[in-house]
Image (cartoon, rainbow, N blue to C red):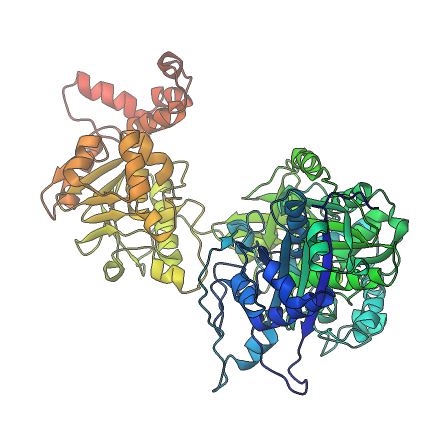
């Protein structure tokens, strides 16, 4: 083909590099140096002068290492603050553009496809794409006395695209133990086993048989991290070396991340390749490609497969104009068996499924594995001119899939139609989800995590409405763990219950009651973080953590939730006051010191302080604000019916100052309580309101002298107690029922049952009688 557009993109050089800890001459290379070695090999592989090619590079794209793939990742030996330019500088390149792509195994192929499109559009001419991991070295030397320092500061622009983690994890999933890849992929794996109606033993055999050929390829690969050939039985059988990870996975069946590996690719336009003198036999063209994203975990209709990855693979083949049977080489991303099974099922029978040996045996190489697959695919296709090779790169939780078809046969750039396919995927209906799940249910899929202790994780469907939910087992619930580990649990009936710390699942309602006995709704004699004083029909509650400005952690929140459960259940308590100990702070909100400690974080189902998410607040709660009510403390005050503040009170929602949001109702209640413009300013800037401003805007009911907030609240409570408690409750109920009715006539005509209950109450009769008899009524709260 001689009439190619001179801007047609082509791969002209590939390179790989690896070192093992026990290699003779082990050099303790950093991730930057590993990538530089691979790029030097790729430049040399072009067949042109490596210096000339490097000097022509206008764009570089780097793949993230694990140590900068999440906001909380650490780099024990230090790292470059501009990885792409650090590598470029090592090889003599001075690109105008440097990219650090998002995390995920799809990133290498996605970046190659993207930069090929940029070359085709005339936006670039010569590009380097590379990635590396030095995890083995970092872990090996982190505690060494002579550990190296891999810290680098490099000047120059950097197009940092962020972590790309959106949709891959949620606070809800993390709370249920789904923060690690093996547990999440195990859910897909067990769903697939159930769909195929295979026993645990038969499915383990199938996984072993899938990966045994991978080990043979890895054993012959000089860059492999674990070049050992293993049988299917060895892979599938638990042992001391092949320990269980998360059912159904053992160690040999999951990606190996302890590697020191790097890989790089050189792309140019045809015109640049000609100008640089790159031989034609070095050139490999991108014939087809696709980039698609699956629905998020809980939104997928079928957890046993990954239709988006199959669609991506098929579309790459369609763009190339070939069938799967036309492929000479295939490399399917193999972090876990299900990632391979899914695409193989979607494309039909394929020949050998890896060119490297796969992630568990060649090595995970972090996000950069598929760069090695591309490099090896290019090498093999050059030895078989005209043949086609396929690379499938998976990221996230069978989430992001980048696929490509390569060949030495020259071909013009083809854009593909991934956008239309993505729109179709995004339109697929999602099962409704119950974040708080209660009642009988059936198991949809599951896993059991191994390690310090076993924990079961279940995705199920509620019998009542078929909503999907996520739940875990209770610590030590051997009965449910046995069901998950030794039985055939999918489709089995179980019982689930929601708590502030998440959903818990067990075998029966009776067993749930044993594990979580109902908490009596009565006041205790003493609490660790709360003081309680009962004065007739008045309950005074004091947050007693003055050393931390009355900030709240899970234990304090739980005690407050318990206290208010007792308050609302006790017919002899008619009004409650909430205040803070020490006089300087009502509450500073969430205890950030506790949050930073790594200890479990959760709030009761009824919300912060047991109030901010409580739906039924049928009796008055007064906030007596002494000093600071900031963050969650302000949200607690907003959740109360009435607020009394002393002259020192300050109200604020400063969450944005620490990278958070006022998620306990502040974002909703504050704009509904004070003028929206003022609320918005407070929320976006952390602006504080003093007591007089808060009074003027209607945030508080009255202001007292300094130190007198509690006394002011008591006076207000006394005035409430002077009225009928049944009428007070009915008033609060009707106000709550009509709050969402915009038309005032419709709201006034709302047929609340509170009216009917009030008409037959003893207190109503007593109130009317006492008025007629010109005496004070005697309320009985019934």
Point out residue 725 in the picture as x, y percentages from the top left corner. 28, 31
Q: Nearer the viewer, residue 750 or 421?
A: 421
Residue name at image x 55 percent, y 76 percent: 138
The reply, left or right, for residue 359 in relation to residue 439 is right
Point out residue 391 in the picture as x, y percentages from the top left corner. 76, 55
Residue name at image x 73 percent, y 51 percent: 270
**Quarter of the figure with residue 50:** bottom right
Furthest-left residue in view? 705
The correct choice, above or below, for 231 with respect to 585 in the image is below
The correct choice, above or below, for 473 with respect to 308 in the image is below
Is residue 255 in view from this perspective?
Answer: no
Count of number-bearing discs: 0
Point out residue 780 in the picture as x, y percentages from the top left corner. 28, 32
The reply, left or right, for residue 687 in relation to residue 369 is left
Point out residue 244 in the picture as x, y percentages from the top left corner. 70, 70
**Quarter of the figure with residue 461:** top right
Residue name at image x 24 percent, y 62 percent: 547
The reply, left or right, for residue 756 in relation to residue 52 is left
Is residue 530 in view from this perspective?
Answer: yes
Which of the image's four quarters has the C terminus?
Answer: top left
Q: Nearer the viewer, residue 722 or 355?
A: 355
Q: Nearer the viewer, residue 689 or 90?
A: 90
**Quarter of the figure with residue 93:** bottom right
């Amino acid at each position: 083909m001689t009439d190619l557009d001179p801007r047609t993109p082509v791969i002209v050089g590939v390179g790989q590099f690896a070192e093992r800890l026990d290699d003779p001459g082990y050099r303790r290379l950093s991730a930057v140096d590993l990538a530089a070695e691979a790029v030097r090999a790729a430049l040399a592989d072009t067949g042109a002068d490596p210096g000339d090619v490097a000097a022509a590079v206008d764009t570089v794209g780097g793949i993230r290492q694990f140590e900068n793939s999440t906001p909380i990742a650490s780099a024990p030996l230090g790292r470059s603050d501009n990885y792409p330019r650090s590598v470029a500088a090592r090889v003599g390149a001075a690109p105008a553009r440097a990219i650090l792509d998002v995390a995920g195994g799809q990133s290498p192929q996605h970046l190659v496809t993207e930069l090929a499109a940029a070359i085709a559009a005339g936006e670039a001419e010569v590009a380097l794409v590379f990635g590396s991991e030095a995890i083995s070295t970092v872990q090996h030397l982190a505690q060494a006395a002579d550990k190296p320092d891999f810290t680098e500061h490099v000047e120059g622009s950097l197009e940092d695209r962020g972590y790309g983690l959106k949709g891959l994890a949620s606070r809800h999933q993390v709370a249920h133990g789904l923060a690690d890849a093996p547990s999440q992929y195990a859910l897909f794996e067990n769903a697939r086993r159930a769909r195929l109606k295979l026993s645990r033993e038969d499915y383990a055999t199938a996984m072993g048989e899938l990966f045994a050929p991978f080990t043979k390829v890895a054993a012959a690969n000089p860059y492999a991290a674990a070049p050992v050939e293993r049988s299917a039985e060895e892979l599938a059988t638990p042992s001391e070396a092949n320990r269980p990870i998360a059912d159904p996975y053992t160690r040999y069946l999951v990606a190996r991340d302890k590697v020191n590996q790097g890989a790089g690719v050189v792309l140019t336009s045809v015109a640049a390749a000609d100008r640089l003198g790159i031989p034609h036999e070095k050139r490999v063209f991108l014939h087809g490609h696709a980039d698609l994203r699956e629905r998020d975990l809980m939104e997928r209709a079928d957890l046993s497969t990954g239709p988006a990855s199959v669609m991506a693979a098929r579309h790459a083949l369609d763009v190339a104009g070939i069938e799967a049977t036309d492929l000479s080489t295939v490399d399917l991303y193999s972090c876990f068996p299900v990632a391979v099974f899914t695409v193989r099922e979607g494309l039909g029978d394929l020949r050998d499924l890896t060119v490297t040996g796969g992630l568990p045996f060649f090595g995970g190489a972090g996000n950069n594995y598929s760069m090695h697959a591309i490099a090896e695919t290019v090498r093999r296709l050059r030895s078989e001119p005209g043949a086609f090779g396929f690379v499938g790169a998976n990221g996230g939780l069978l989430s992001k899939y980048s696929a490509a078809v390569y060949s030495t046969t020259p071909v013009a750039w083809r854009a593909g139609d991934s956008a239309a396919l993505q729109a179709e995927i995004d339109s697929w209906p999602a099962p409704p989800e119950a974040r708080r799940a209660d009642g009988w249910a059936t198991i949809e899929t599951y896993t059991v995590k191994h390690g310090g202790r076993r924990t079961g994780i279940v995705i199920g469907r509620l019998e009542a409405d078929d909503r999907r939910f996520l739940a875990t087992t209770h610590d030590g619930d051997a009965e449910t763990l046995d069901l998950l580990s030794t039985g055939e649990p999918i489709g089995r009936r179980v019982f689930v219950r929601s708590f502030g710390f998440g959903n818990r699942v067990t075998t029966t309602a009776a067993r749930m009651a044993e594990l979580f006995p109902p908490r009596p709704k009565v006041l205790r004699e003493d609490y660790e973080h709360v003081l309680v004083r009962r004065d007739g029909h008045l309950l005074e509650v004091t947050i007693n953590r003055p050393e931390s400005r009355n900030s709240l952690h899970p234990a304090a929140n739980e005690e407050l939730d318990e206290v208010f459960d007792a308050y609302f259940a006790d017919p002899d308590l008619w009004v409650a006051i909430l205040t803070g100990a020490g006089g300087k702070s009502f509450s500073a909100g969430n205890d950030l010191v506790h949050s930073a400690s790594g200890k479990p974080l959760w709030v009761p189902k009824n919300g912060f302080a047991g109030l901010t998410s409580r739906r039924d607040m049928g009796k008055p709660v007064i906030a007596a604000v002494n000093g600071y009510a900031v963050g969650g403390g302000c949200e607690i005050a907003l959740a109360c019916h009435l607020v009394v503040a002393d002259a020192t009170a300050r109200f604020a929602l400063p969450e944005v100052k620490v990278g958070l949001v006022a998620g306990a109702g502040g974002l909703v209640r504050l704009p509904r309580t004070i003028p929206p413009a003022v609320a918005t300013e407070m929320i976006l800037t952390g602006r504080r309101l003093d007591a007089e401003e808060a009074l003027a805007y209607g945030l508080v009911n009255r202001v007292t002298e300094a130190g007198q907030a509690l006394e002011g609240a008591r006076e207000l409570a006394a005035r409430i107690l002077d009225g009928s408690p049944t009428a007070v409750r009915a008033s609060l109920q009707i106000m709550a029922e009509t709050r969402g009715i915009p038309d005032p006539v419709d709201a006034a005509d709302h047929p609340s049952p509170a009216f009917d209950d009030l008409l037959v109450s003893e207190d109503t009769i007593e109130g009317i009688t006492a008025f007629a008899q010109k005496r004070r009524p005697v309320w009985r709260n019934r």
